Image: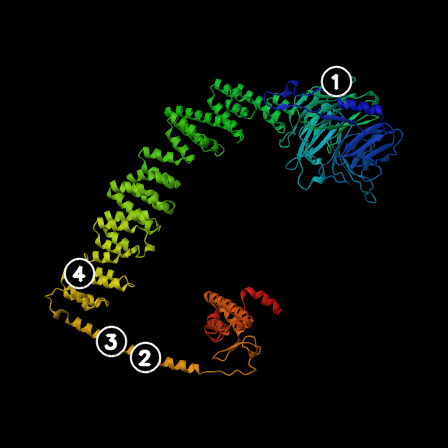
Amino acid sequence: MSSILDEYEDSLNSRHPVQHSSRLSAANIGMTHSGFVNVRLEEEKPIFNKQRIDFSPPEKINHFAVCNNQLCMSLGKDTLLRIDLAKPDRPNQVELGRKEDSRVHKLFLDPTGSHLVISLSTSECLYLNRNTQKVRSLSRWRGHLIESVGWNKLLRTETNTGPILVGTSQGIIFEAEISASEGSLFNTNPDQYFKQVHSLEEDGRPVPVCCIEVERGPESKVFIIATTRKRLFQFVGRVAEGSEQQGFSSIFSQNQELLPSFQEFPFNMGYSEITFYTPKLRSCPKAFAWMMGNGVLYGQLDYVKLDSLLSDVQVWDYTPDIDFSFNKPISIVLTQFHFLLLLPDRVKAICTLNGQVVYEDVFSDKFGTLKKMIKDPAGGLVWIYTEKAVFRYHIQREARDVWQMYMSMNKFDLAKEYCRDRPECMDMVLAKEAEHCFQDKRYLESAKCYALTQNYFEEIALKFIEAKQEEALKEFLLKKLNNLKQSEKTQITLLVTWLTELYLNRLGLLQSDEGNHGVFQEKRDEFRKFLSSSKHKECLYNNRTTIYDLLASHGNVDDMVYFSVIMQDYERVISHHCQHDDYSAALEVLSKHCDEKLFYKFSPILMQHIPKKVVDAWIQMGSRLEPKKLIPALVNYSQMGSTQQVNETIRYMEFCVYQLTVTEEAIHNYLLSLYAKYKPDSLLWYLEQAGSHLSDIHYDLKYALRLCAEHGYLQACVLVYKIMELYEEAVDLALQVDVDLAKTCADLPEDDEELRKKLWLKIARHVVQEEKDVKKAMNCLSSCNLLKIEDILPFFPDFVTIDHFKEAICSSLEEYNQHIDELKQEMEEATESAKRIREDIQEMRNKYGVVENQEKCAACDFPLLNRPFYLFLCGHMFHYDCLFQEVSPHLSTYKQTKLDELQKKLAAATQTSKSRHRTAPKEKEEGGDTASLGKGSAGVSREQIKSDIDDVIARECVYCGELMIKSIDQPFIDPQKFEEEKSSWL
């Protein structure tokens, strides 16, 4: 365990390492030029955060390996310690059981952490599987000092490595396979085979294979990278599908004919090391860094290239403080943007973008010399160990300052990619890019970038104005406008107005240049697209007056009409067409948008020039238009217009009346006036089909009568009189037209015989006195049964002889005789009927009925003789009170009220009678005559009341009379008492 002082020193080193990071300068703290506030509330954690592992090894650490959270270290002479970092409290210790003179040369752990190969200094190799405690010897590997292992990442399992490549100190590359299973009876070795596939040389001499890496690319490609002290070899080939288990021999055989591709550097430091950066677990590496004598060779891996895997390579020289005599680099680890160099007493982080040292961490010498640095690809942690301690680095937000480097290199797209979540940094990148484009005279691109920044609007706008770059200024304003929020109404209004002015200026210049018609049309389309933008529709609508003024000041009539249509300001569009005498276009706009108010406003002028089309449009609108509001236009031009206008007016009025069935009086009156003035033939037909009942009439009868009278249409006047039920006036006027017409009028008052007779007398008088036609007068007698010959005789002159109407007089006398005979017969029948009635009355007086003592009430079924009762001729018998209850529900309201009054009177009379009986002794003393008189008058009153009650309730049998017949449609049980009755039965 480490001491408290050690932990304190470690914490100081982790908090205050030597940093060379290019952070934002202090000048950027606070309010920046871009408008963003950059205030750091707490100290930002460093990218490389060191932590010492709370572990004190019992012996010196010789070698160390970690992969997939599986940590293996060689301790002392014969101990191997394995720790699963997911379960650090359960370490596993294995004794190697090696000879005294041997020591561990290197440890090789595969990427899954399942297979461990231990290379011994005696040119022997041991194998240990993660799931076993038994260390097994690799006999086929004996005699070779293993320097590197290239693991198979595709075919490996927990118990089998699959084909792997092994590099030795003599430059030989072997292909081998290790299996953790016990094998067969005759083969118990874990190494399945071990064969040479290639050898590497430098200057004609064998050299150690320092590192070897195997990667697979698309289309079954296999890439093998092997390094020596100063050479980097590449082997590229294809493996046939299904032959992966055959290993890598075919890859090396494909390169035998040609010299292997390699890169060589002049200087070597006795060893080299290559490391790779893999962005995601189980994916292919994207970059590499090779530590060798001349520096660090850094580049990308391109799996698409045919001849080489390496691309964009460059050499970063070592810093001047690195001296190969006593300060040589030991190890290298590659991250996304840095490579870490391990020196004997410190760690340096160099940025791969610019080769600058961004981090340097010096270790205390109390832990001893730093021995090795390893990166675990699974967790991304970097491990460093000495003989006495183990350290671990966490790499946090490595890309935080990359944007600045890319920005300084003018790689703005990459810079923006790495500061998307930091708006203040994005703003700086955009401003730098905009300025760079402006300097390169790429003004449009500069405007687009400036619009995304928070730089001062006025400053940028003036910049483009001074450069006389109107198109760039317009682009800047458009982008700025699109980035504004809807709530920023003032800014939106300013930009929209300014852009409109710029567009109009540009269109004016292009229009004057006839050679730029195509460009003019393109800019006009762009301007109209701007005007029709839905995003700024509200602003354009609210400021449409200003836009109209701008368009008018530039004389741009076409775009003004277009803008009016967009703003749905159809009134302005229609006015424009009317002012230019293009009435058909105005009507087309009107018909397209179907605005009723605009129809009412512009119909008068359109009706004057294109009446037929206007009426067609009205008819097409149908009931959406109110005909009454169109009357002013119709009246105006029907009075002063041509025959066509009058005919179109009548056509629309007829459409309203006969198809829309408009009932407004003004419409019908106007149609009547048109008929009376221009189409008299249709007037009488209209009046006839309009109906003869006042409820069916929708025109003003008095107005119609005056209209017809003014134009002398007597027959129409007669029709109106008939509808107004002014039959005398109708007959008087009809006699001026036709006697037959007068006769039809005279028969109309069917319920008033006196009036009918009077009307027929008028007709007869007219026939006799005016036409002097006796024969037609006689026909009047036959047409009306109310007239007699004596009624019309006074109308004839004295000199007329009786021969002309002798027959009429004779027939009249015969009718009188017949009527007298009928009256005599009726008198005889009435006398006989009165005689029979008297006999029936006499018979009823002597009629009686017999009631037995066992008879029961028909209603309550109790003995009848117990209480006052009624006996009916039909045989039914009822108690007085039972009959009262049966009859009461069937009485009318009037009779019910009358019965209640009679009941009250009877009760009052009974009470009076009782009181008089109590005062009878006193009355006897005072005078008996007076008492008997009072009793007699009271008795008569009570009997009369009882008789009236009998007339109401006992007029007929309740079971046999009309009451039972009238109640046939009533339910047996009152609906209001149904539920009560229903529950009583349950």
Residue ranking furthest to the left: 799
Disc 1 vs disc 2: Cβ atoms closer than 8 Å? no
Q: Work out how far the residue at label 2 is from the one at label 4, CA to CA, in angstroms.
A: 48 Å
| Quarter of the picture holding the N terminus | top right
* Mark sitting earlier along the chain (3/2): 3
Q: Work out how far the residue at label 3 is from the one at label 1, CA to CA, in angstroms.
A: 162 Å
Asked which quadrant contains residue 690, the reply is bottom left
* Mark sitting earlier along the chain (2/4): 4
Query: Which of pointers 3 and 4 indicates the residue nearer the eye?
Result: 3
Under mark 2, the amino acid is Thr
Measured from the top left, where is residue 698 in percent x and y? 32, 51
Judging by the rendered image, the residue that carries numbered circle 3 is 820
Measured from the top left, where is residue 910 in percent x and y? 53, 70
873, 229: nearer the viewer: 873
Q: In the image, which disc is placed on residue 766?
A: 4
Query: Which of pointers 2 and 4 indicates the residue nearer the eye?
Result: 2
Measured from the top left, where is residue 447 in percent x and y? 52, 24
- 289 relative position to 906: left or right: right
Judging by the rendered image, the residue that carries numbered circle 2 is 831
Under mark 4, the amino acid is His
Query: Which of pointers 3 and 2 indicates the residue nearer the eye?
Result: 2
Q: Residues within 10 Å of mark 4 (few under 14, many from 20)?
A: some
Query: Which of pointers 3 and 1 indicates the residue nearer the eye?
Result: 3
Q: In the image, which disc is placed on residue 322?
A: 1
Position of residue 325 relative to residue 861, above or below, is: above
Residue ranking furthest to the front: 926
